[in-house]
């Protein structure tokens, strides 16, 4: 994977390098998706401490 300076002008070499790069990116994307699917678990919905609809506004400095 990779091209030297003179290979940029050669369509066959450019096509081969492009195919290799796209294949490598697709494989890495798939592996990343599988890794995230296997390791990220949502145990619940994140909520504000005051309950639904009890969001603090930006000017509220009290806790």
Image (spheres, helix red, strand yellow):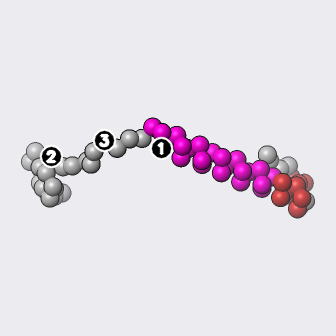
Other-residue count near label 3 (Cα within 10 Å), few / some / many at <14 / 14–19 / ≥20: few
- Which quadrant would the C terminus be assigned to in this image? top left
Secondary structure at numbered mark 2: loop
What residue sits right under mark 3 in the picture?
Answer: 43
**Does the residue at mark 3 contact the one at mark 2 (Cβ under 8 Å)?**
no
Residue 27 as seen in the image, left or right of residue 56: right
Q: Which mark is residue 48?
A: none
> Which of 18/3 is in front?
18
Residue drawn at x 77%, y 50% as measured from the top left? 20
Residue 22 in picture, x, y percent from top left: 71, 54
Residue 18 as seen in the image, left or right of residue 12: left
Tell me where residue 52 sits by quadrant. bottom left
The numbered mark, 1 or 3, whose residue comes first in the sequence reads: 1
Other-residue count near label 1 (Cα within 10 Å), few / some / many at <14 / 14–19 / ≥20: few
Magenta region, main secondary structure: helix
Above or below — where is 44 with respect to 60? above
Q: Nearer the viewer, mark 3 or mark 2?
A: 3
What residue sits right under mark 2 in the picture?
Answer: 49
What residue sits right under mark 1 in the picture?
Answer: 37
Image label count? 3
Residue drawn at x 27%, y 45% as measured from the top left? 44
Magenta stretch in the rendered image = 17-39
Secondary structure at numbered mark 3: loop
Residue drawn at x 27%, y 48% as measured from the top left? 45
Other-residue count near label 2 (Cα within 10 Å), few / some / many at <14 / 14–19 / ≥20: few
> Which of 41/15 is in front?
41
Q: Nearer the viewer, mark 1 or mark 2?
A: 1
The numbered mark, 1 or 2, whose residue comes first in the sequence reads: 1
Residue occupying the far top of the picture: 39
């Amino acid at each position: 994977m990779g091209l030297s300076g003179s290979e940029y002008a050669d369509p066959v070499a450019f096509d081969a390098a492009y195919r290799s790069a796209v294949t490598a990116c697709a494989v890495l994307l798939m592996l990343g998706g599988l890794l995230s699917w296997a390791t990220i678990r949502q145990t619940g919905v994140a909520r504000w401490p005051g309950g639904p609809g009890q969001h603090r506004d930006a000017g509220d400095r009290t806790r």
